[in-house]
Amino acid sequence: MGPAGQHGGMDQDRSAPATGQATMRAIVGRTYGSADVLHLTQLAPPQIADNDVLVKVHAAGLDRGTWHLMTGLPYLGRLALGLRAPKQPVPGLDLAGTVVAVGAAVTRFEVGDAVFGIGRGSFAQYTAAREDKLARKPANLTFEQAAVVPVSGLTALHGVCDAGRVAAGQRVLVIGASGGVGTYAVQLAKAFGADVTGVCSTAKVDLVRSLGADHVLDYTKDDFADGAQRYDLVLDIGGRSRLARLRRALVSQGTLVIVGGEGGGRLTGGFGRQLRALALSPFVSQRLTMLLPKEHYADLERLSDLIEAGTLAPRIDRTYPLAEAPDAMRHLVAGQARGKISITIDA
């Protein structure tokens, strides 16, 4: 079937994109490039398909994935994103907001539900999202807090629990512990009973300690691979260390999880290092692995349960209004963020 509003005889209260306005405010980037390509404009609200939910966005989160979508780097990613220009000109993945319409096949949500999850272009007043990429907003979080959980929280959950197979009593090293994914990874590893060491810059040592890390290494002074300690699980989040150096930090049967595609050349980025790790893994005693994108409401609900139990909490560095989203991106790229960045969408 076609987009919502074109299903003959369908209940219009459930399917029509009932925004009550002909246009919406949105950040748009129609070419690849730096934050300078982003600008605020007016667009028609999105239509929704049968399995979609239309969300009035109250807040959006900013993550490194959105930077990759904006720049089109590494070039390999453009096979999916658009070869010459972004297929999705409105950036943003993370969102928290209120359901204003649902597609014909949607069964888990009704108009008025407060939700969080992953949508298609969340730097806008309204966005469409697949039903299976949304969950109900944790009751103890504001929209601004909930909006910074989905992408980074899911990445940390899969890195620590699924790929990393963390267990109580293990020694876990989190490289990049002060960033968006790292702040969740430290908390999750602690929640599952691990002894956690976080690696960060001098200015962020206090933040990582506040997350519950048992030990903090300042990478400007300390070398995690000096042999003083070896770890059962190493999560390299946005790092650029060579595989040989990362392996020196592991016990003989340890696990390395490479998270994200940072560093490397413009063609494959950090994914080249991940592929080399996968190729080497069968020939060494250590398990070397990477993450593949997995976005499903069941995992969002896992995060929500931990948040509502008080085990996991988002750490927001700064909140920017929608019109200042380019500045938020510049702050992220500069490496200054302590935790997550939230974008508020003022209707």
Image (cartoon, rainbow, N blue to C red):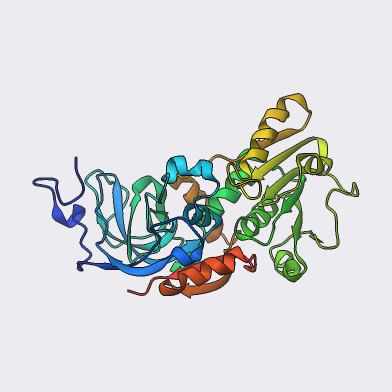
- The residue closer to the viewer here, 6 or 251, is 6
Identity of the residue drawn at 44% across and 64% down: 37
- The residue closer to the viewer here, 334 or 142, is 334
Residue 252, percent from left and from top: 83, 34
Residue 196, percent from left and from top: 76, 53
The residue sitting at the left extreme is 9
* Tag count: 0
Indicate the quadrant where residue 114 lies: bottom left
* Relative vertical location of residue 287 with respect to residue 129 in this rendering, above or below: above
Residue 54 makes an appearance in the image: yes
Task: Determine whether, in the image, residue 86 is placed left or right of residue 43.
Answer: right
* Relative vertical location of residue 86 with respect to residue 111 in this rendering, above or below: above
Residue 147, percent from left and from top: 47, 62
Indicate the quadrant where residue 217 lies: bottom right
Which image quadrant: the N terminus? Answer: top left
Residue 309, percent from left and from top: 56, 59
Identity of the residue drawn at 61% across and 55% down: 181
Task: Determine whether, in the image, residue 187 is placed left or right of residue 149.
Answer: right
Which image quadrant: the C terminus? Answer: bottom left
Identity of the residue drawn at 47% across and 53% down: 69
Residue 142 makes an appearance in the image: no
Identity of the residue drawn at 14% across and 48% down: 6
The residue sitting at the top extreme is 283
Task: Determine whether, in the image, residue 182 is placed left or right of residue 123.
Answer: right
The residue sitting at the front extreme is 84
- The residue closer to the viewer here, 92 or 53, is 92
